[in-house]
Amino acid sequence: MTELLFVIPLSLVIIDAVLQLMFFSVSSFERIEDLTALTGWSSAEKLFSFLGTAVRHSGIGLPDRWEKELFSGQTNLSSIPAWALWKKPVSVGNSISGYSFTDSSGEWGNTLRLVYGVPVEIILTETLSLTAFEKRSAVFSGNVGISGKLGATKSGSWILFPGTLVPVLVTGDGNSANPTVCSQQDTYVPWGTPPCRLMAVSLYVSGQTLFANFHDESGAQPLLKNVSAVEFRLEGAEVLHVKVKFLMNSGAKMEESRSWRIAT
């Protein structure tokens, strides 16, 4: 009987603790469910998803710094793409709607400039040996997938082969397995090498809209809405920090942050 009198109160304490934990879990789940239903929260998560993919590939096939001559036009050496002058794959600074960019030197800034390589699920099936400014056909195992107009100032027209650090411009038949390519320097790429399609993007907020300029001659495009501010900061050259500020439906202010290690 004595043991029973001792066990019953102990059991009640345990049951009470379990019930409190259940109520807390349900409450937390409902709060997260409410938050994720908000437009601003959705925009923040979409931005994090987009940046996660881009940052993970920002160092693949790219040197820490490059010379602008690698990206100049094939017939006019003064034709330099804007993103070629960034000098490095990831840079943070301040701008006014993407213009008058000034490097923030490790402090928080309102504009991100990012150059990254998008892996293409194909490989070279024949060795590619290019003499500077020579145009020739490359042979891949599948479609390179570059549609639309080609040009030296369009980031999507360039291919990077990891290990070479020299960008190769697609000058013809981009939407095929045998595009015509050209390089600013003598370039040798062994068969079996997978290509990465080069992408360049500037991100900034203007009027609660996050704009993205992919430097493909289409200009700045609205990427996400209901974002009041986005701040970026580079920690050395290895970590990118991002803070997103947005308004909930109730008018309350929210902030979410993420950090990524830059690929090397």
Image (cartoon, grey):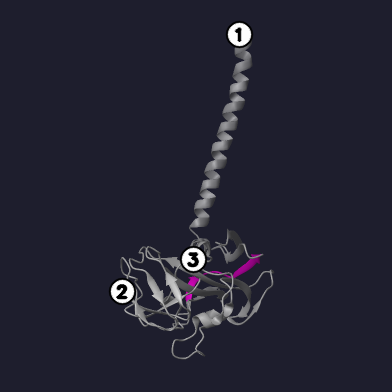
Q: Which residue is mark 1?
A: 1
Mark with earlier residue (3, 2): 3
Q: Is residue 211 visible?
A: no
**Residue at the spot 47% in from the left edge and 66% down from the top edge:** 162
Instruction: Give the quadrant of residue 205.
Output: bottom right
Which part of the image, by quadrant, shows the N terminus?
Answer: top right
Relative to 120, is 162 on the left or the right?
A: right
Q: Which residue is mark 2?
A: 178
Foreground: disc 3 or disc 2 = 3
- For label 3, the SS is loop
Provide residue 192's location: percent of width, then percent of height: 37, 62
Q: Identify residue type, mark 3.
A: Gly
Residue toward you, 244 or 174? 174
Q: Which residues are magenta?
A: 222-235
Q: Which residue is mark 3?
A: 163
**Residue 253, which numbered label?**
none
234 is higher (above) or lower (below) than 180? above
Q: Identify residue type, mark 1.
A: Met
- For label 1, the SS is loop
User: Label 1 vs label 3: CA separation?
Assistant: 78 Å
Provide residue 201's location: percent of width, then percent of height: 51, 74
Provide residue 245's location: percent of width, then percent of height: 60, 65
98 is higher (above) or lower (below) than 30? below
- For label 2, the SS is loop
